[in-house]
Amino acid sequence: MKADLTISEVRKGLKTREFSAVELMQYFLSRIEQYSALNAYVTLDTEKALAAAKEADERIAAGEDLPLLGVPLAIKDLFCTKGMKTTACSKILSEFVPEYESTVTQNLLDDGAVFIGKTNMDEFAMGSSNITSCFGACFLPYRKKSAPDVPLVPGGSSGGSATAVASDLCIAATGSDTGGSVRQPAAFSGLVGIKPTYGLCSRWGMVAFASSLDQAGPLTKCVEDAAIMLRSMAGYDPKDSTSANVEIPDYASFLGQSIKGMKIGIAKEYTDGLNNENMAMFERAKSWLVDAGCELVDISLKTTPYALPAYYIIAPAEASSNLARYDGVRYSKRAEHYDNIDELYTNSRSEGFGEEVKRRILTGTYVLSAGYYDAYYTKALKIQKMIKDDFRDNAFSKVDLILTMTSPNTAFGVEESTQMSPTDMYLNDIFTVNSNIAGLPAISVPAGLSNDGLPMGVQLIGNHFRECDIFKVAHVLEVAANFFDKRQKIIKI
């Protein structure tokens, strides 16, 4: 059986009886066992997965036709899955088995998907390398030509989902994006990853990091799969007060449409400081769009330098609030040893949270404190509004989409990531956080390989609820790059 199947290929193979859903599930489960050292999955329920695949076969035989019927998916470990452990890769949630299904995963199930298991991630989605997980790091199935023995990170926080898709341990996977946690792993892993408009996908049943920034999104092998996945994941949900009540179109139907005459913004703030290799890739992407009939328009987004500082005030502040419930009393794992209520709180949280999560909780608590609220948090919210206005007035009044690189660098070594300062690690999000701050949709598309043989991604940012435009142009970039056919995986542990 071919390993790198797409959703369309799976649906065709199941309909023509080329293989069954059970055979497909058995195949992926065997690959997961074979490549367990990648550490992509943290929870598997083989019996449940095979039972779901068997049910899918019966539904197909009965003539049912759903967009994802029988398609094996991996689920990031912050989406609550009924009866399957959901830990957000944190010790403090190590015993949590939800009695309910998140809206996003329920939507996927309603469209016929079968779940393989839960994927590794940075603890509570806080990280850009997937090294903060309590289950340990997961690894990219690529190696540098110059350092073939050095294991690389898949990016974060959706690193396990990226590794699972890139290594063909599933067909596609869910991720979440608070500051780039779908798009950066997509760029590192040679995948397509889209962060939709804030509110397009329900946050109900997702373990919260920063509620005003979190948004679910898919990680897939191609643009068509991303379009199919997003249509299933998205939709209005009255259980989420920030859910947008908008029509969800058939995104895949926009693929292949002409993009002639579309205006693509080139913001100098996103190109200043790019290294030669990134700039060369960016210029190639620009030429592909020109060849397709697009008009490139120079724009300026002067608030861009303030996005990362604002993000690292707003996100920790919201994390501090959201994670306050995990105190060992009603929620989360309780410390075994304590003499009073203060020690219960202190010991439970000290033992349950990892270092990066503690750092962000402390930062968030500090900026929300009485003496510093106005100096930091209030100011960050004002900057957030300025960034939103900047995109509205100086970008999308002139252009349809904005083209940028996704990440300032390619995948780095696991050991290298442990030696980075927190500030250096945060700089990995420099091209992605703006979209979260402004609530805009953005996609990362693989554009080619670096000189060292590692995937590089380009990013398209669109206006609110203009995912259709994003998919149209992303498909053109994908065809021009021809990355899917020429990617060469090296699974070497």
Image (tube, rainbow, N blue to C red):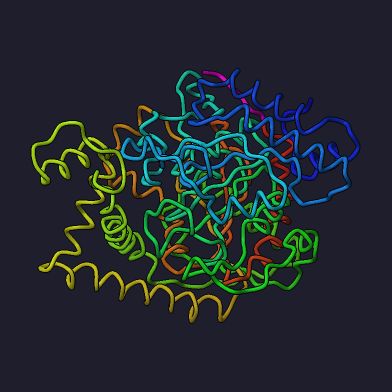
Question: Would you say 441 lies left or right of 97 here?
Answer: right
In front: 467, or 51?
Answer: 51
Residue at position x 75%, y 58% from top? 252
Q: Give the range drawn in magenta.
A: 488-493
In the image, residue 136 above or below residue 380: above
Residue at position x 56%, y 28% from top? 142
Q: Where is residue 35 in the image (x, y as percent from the top left)?
A: 57, 21
In front: 435, or 282?
Answer: 435
Residue at position x 10%, y 46% from top? 342
Q: Please tell me whether residue 47 belongs to the stretch shown in magenta.
A: no
Q: Magenta region's main secondary structure?
A: loop
Question: Would you say 64 lies left or right of 220 here?
Answer: right
In front: 356, or 222?
Answer: 356
Q: Where is residue 223 in the image (x, y as percent from the top left)?
A: 69, 51
User: Quick one: which residue is furthest to the right in this view?
Assistant: 16
Residue at position x 48%, y 81% from top? 393
Count all numbered tags in the image, as a single digit.
0
Whether residue 402 can be seen here? no
Q: Where is residue 53 in the image (x, y as percent from the top left)?
A: 72, 35
In the image, residue 244 above or below residue 3: below
Quarter holding the N terminus? top right
In the image, residue 231 above or below residue 218: below
Q: Where is residue 188 in the image (x, y as percent from the top left)?
A: 52, 40
In the image, residue 102 above or below residue 148: below
